[in-house]
Image (spheres, grey):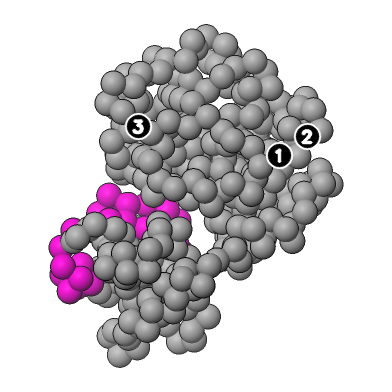
Amino acid sequence: MNKDISSELFALVKEARSIALTTHKDSDGDGMVACYALQQILAASGHDSTIVSDGEDLDRYAFLNRKPTVEIFREDMSFELVIVLDCNSYDRIGQRRALTDKARKVVVLDHHVIEHNPIPADLQVVDYAFPSVGALLWRCLAESIQKLNPDWRKYVADCVYVSILNDSNNFSNANTNATMFEISAELAREGIKAHELHMAYLQNHSAKEMLYVGRSLSTIRLQDDGKFLFLYSDKALAEELGVDPSAYMSVTRWVQGVSGLRAIAYFREDEPGLWKVSLRSLVFDVQEVAARHGGGGHRKASGLTLQGSLQEVQAIILRELKQANPIS
């Protein structure tokens, strides 16, 4: 969908006395940074908004050099208009469902397959052709973006490029398509410094963070006669090294080049017995696997959360992968 929705969106924005922007649980450089971009677009038209987070560390985006208005979710929060980016399911926004339940109007902007338990919306734009929700914003709000002054437009362009880097794993995932390159060329003409953004977002790691990745890689085990690769990071490792593990679901990119695999599963323990699972496959539809457990994503890259011991959650995922449907 390349239809510009500026007029439809701003009709809702103008009616609202308070606006919240939010994204999925375990936010990433697509959903959260797209919130940054949209907040700037709204501000340029005189509309204040608040990004509502779960309290995750946002310092990883400090290189964007603009401080957004962010508040950590509270039960007593209420906004007339809530805009949800990068997810379309109640299962994916967790406790922040309360925001949509209390809102007068809801907007959903996403590029994922419509999932179980979808969020009802007054305006919904879900288009799988876009490599990131940031890229969707760039196209579907082009009219509004072109009205921004050059500095603000450049900031939005930087955010959109980071969103593409995040969801394409630096143009290496299966979602890398013509649309991605076309939009990236437009961003380059806006003056983004692609190399600097790449270094700041993907290669700005401390020695301890790289040790975290290395120790995680040392847990690699092959399952089912080498069809599946499993690896994990437990909470004790993050505490020992003093790193924020929420920034390292990208541990999976260090093993995506292993030949002969049918799927990869990375297990990260965020709290005792609570495991964030990242699935990657070029063969099986892992989005279906994730959706059955309240997660989501794309057919070739998805995530979910499970409770139990490492052995228990790995057994669940192994069973699911053995029964997974091939990508048609």
Q: Are dots 1 and 3 in contact, CB under 8 Å?
A: no
- Label located before the other in sequence (1 or 3): 3
Tell me where residue 230 sits by quadrant.
Answer: bottom left
Which residue is under mark 2? 151
Residue 148 placement: quadrant: top right
Q: Amino acid at mark 1?
A: Tyr
Q: Amino acid at mark 2?
A: Asp
Residue 204 in view? yes
Label 1: few (<14), some (14–19) or many (≥20) C-alpha neighbours in 10 Å: many
Decide: marks 2, 1 in contact (CB < 8 A)? Answer: yes
Q: Is 62 positioned to the left or the right of 244 in the image? A: right
Q: What's the distance in space between the residues labelled 1 and 3, CA to CA?
A: 26 Å
Range of residues picked out in magenta: 290-315
- Near mark 3 (Cα within 10 A), the count class, few <14, some 14-19 or many ≥20, is some
Q: Are marks 2 and 3 in contact (CB under 8 Å)?
A: no
Would you name the residue on which mark 3 appears? 73
The residues bearing labels 2 and 3 have C-alpha atoms spaced at a distance of 30 Å
Height in image: 299 above or below 104? below
Quadrant of the image for the C terminus? bottom left
Q: Where does the image place residue 115, in percent across and percent down from the top left? A: 36, 45
Q: Position of residue 242 (x, y in %)?
A: 38, 63
Does residue 18 appear to the left or right of 231 in the view shown? right
Indicate whether residue 319 is drawn in magenta: no
Q: Look at the image and tell me whether residue 83 can be seen.
A: no
The answer to which of 266 and 2 lies nearer the viewer is 266
| Callout count | 3
Q: Which mark is residue 155?
A: 1
- Say which residue appears at 67% left-offset and 62% top-offset: 199
